[in-house]
Image (spheres, grey):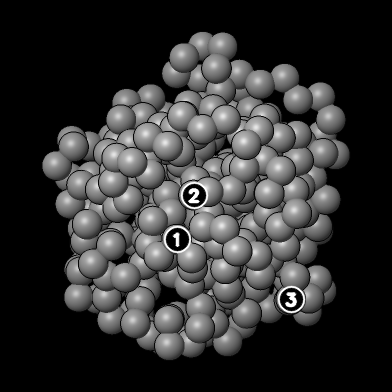
Amino acid sequence: MKRILDLNASDIKKLNKEDILNSIKAAEGRTVMSEIIGKYPPILGDVSNVEVACSFGTDIILLNMYDVENPVINGLEIQDDENFLRELKDIVGRIVGINLEPVDESKELFDEKIKISEGRLATVNNVKKVLDQGADFIVLTGNPKTGVTNEKIINTINNIRNELGENVLIIAGKMHSSGNDEEIINQKIVEEFIEAGADIILVPAPGTVPGITLQKITDITSYVHKKNKLIMTTIGTSQEGSDDYTIKQIAINSKMAGVDIHHIGDAGMSPGIATPENIMNYSISIKGKRHTYRRMAKSIKR
């Protein structure tokens, strides 16, 4: 199996869940995932933010605030909603997944609650739709002020597994509080995610959320790997728009913790994409200039 940083558009069309997981394992902690909000204006006008992220060394694209009923990537003209993500993958030559949000309506928030559209909710029906549109994976997580809880994430994983089986690649966890006054992550929560059927555990990167230390993430990563699952650290706290030193520190700390995927968020100088140089700097920190520049330069056709 090729490492994920070596895949092209032709390879991606043939991948199943196990292939994707094995290609990430083969990369040995050198996989960068960029989160993009497609409905926001492109920072370069007529070039989509997805294309920009790929050109700066991204290996995987994650679409945030993606509405399954009204898919949009500003800067790209994709007319076929039923094959929207399939067409996007043909354009950028990357694995593509989306966030869906398991909102818990029963919980009160310590912050103002934001109401999100039905097409962004983590329902089994919405999962079916995005898989039909060509998604390679689903991330069950929450944006700020949405009211997503770990309990609801666990229930949603169970629902997806019961209705759709084992072939759906599920990433699960919270990047920050999502407005709820609960512990974001600990080993018990991780155990419950895994027991419910998560394939990849999402945790905040060390230094991005108060109390999320290198030691804590190292311990959680060790536990996840013993359970033969993968783990992804995330920058969901606007630090994707910080200085070079901070990005490199987060990258190296996450690499030392032993994680498999390095996520960088969607809020740089402009909302919708990380500061592009930070995507490149993160990539260089975990896989060096040779692999980063090669990823940036290589045509998706070979």
Q: Earlier in the sequence, mark 1 or mark 3?
A: 1
Q: What label sits on residue 5 in the rendered view?
A: 2
- Label 1 with label 2: CB-CB less than 8 Å: yes
Q: Amino acid at mark 1?
A: Ala
Q: Amino acid at mark 2?
A: Leu
Evaluate whether residue 105 shows in this view. Answer: no
Residue 109 versus residue 235 in the image, above or below: below
Would you name the residue on which mark 1 appears?
27
Label 2 crowd bin: few (<14), some (14–19), many (20+), radius 10 Å: many
Label 1 secondary element: loop
Label 3 secondary element: loop
Would you name the residue on which mark 3 appears?
166
Residue 85 versus residue 201 in the image, above or below: above
Residue 277 versus residue 187 in the image, above or below: above
Considering every residue shown, the one lying at the far top of the view is 45
Quadrant placement of the N terminus: bottom right
Residue 9 is left or right of residue 225, and the answer is: right
Location of residue 270 in the rendering, given as x and y in whole percent from the top left corner: 38, 25
How far apart are the alpha carbons under marks 1 and 3? 23 Å
Residue 227 versus residue 22: which sits nearer the camera? Answer: 22
Evaluate whether residue 135 shows in this view. Answer: yes
- Label 1 with label 3: CB-CB less than 8 Å: no
